Image (cartoon, grey):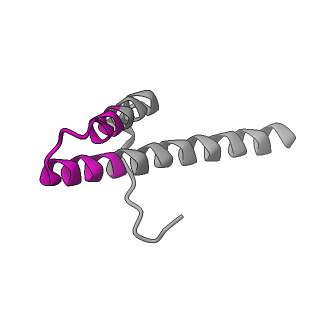
Amino acid sequence: MSAGKKSTPAGDETPYEALVAGLEEALERLEGGELSLEEALVTYEQGAALASRAQEVLDRAEQRIQELRELDGE
């Protein structure tokens, strides 16, 4: 975990699937080659933010699974 990592409040969490869909949409726009340089930069930044949020969701899921395994082992 990085020191600058921001946590998302539980009530404000976008579902993982929606984050991936947004990331795929950003990738399609970038690969389409029809964006201006500024639009491409903004789209890239949005995609990077979506990827980071998706990774946070996966990290929390992994942590929950680990906690459940530890409880099951006790």
Residue at (41%, 63%) from the top-left corner? 5
Q: Which residues are magenta?
A: 25-48
Residue 5 included in the magenta stretch of the image: no
Residue 38 included in the magenta stretch of the image: yes
- Dominant secondary structure of the magenta stretch? helix
Q: Nearer the viewer, residue 67 or 38?
A: 38
Does residue 6 sit above or below 57 in this rendering?
below
The N terminus sits in image quarter: bottom right
Residue occupying the far front of the picture: 33
The percent coordinates of residue 43 (x first, y second) are: 24, 46
Q: Nearer the viewer, residue 61 or 51?
A: 51
The C terminus sits in image quarter: top right
The percent coordinates of residue 61 (x first, y second) are: 58, 40
Where, by quadrant of the figure, is residue 38 drawn? bottom left
Residue occupying the far bottom of the picture: 3
The percent coordinates of residue 46 (x first, y second) are: 27, 47
Q: Nearer the viewer, residue 70 or 32?
A: 32
Horizontal side of residue 59 vs 28, given as left or right? right
Horizontal side of residue 68 vs 26, given as left or right? right
Residue at (63%, 44%) from the top-left corner? 62
Q: How many marks?
A: 0
Where, by quadrant of the figure, is residue 22 drawn? top left
Q: Nearer the viewer, residue 46 or 31?
A: 31
Residue at (25%, 40%) from the top-left corner? 33
Residue at (45%, 43%) from the top-left corner? 54
The percent coordinates of residue 26 (x first, y second) are: 30, 38
Residue occupying the far right of the picture: 73
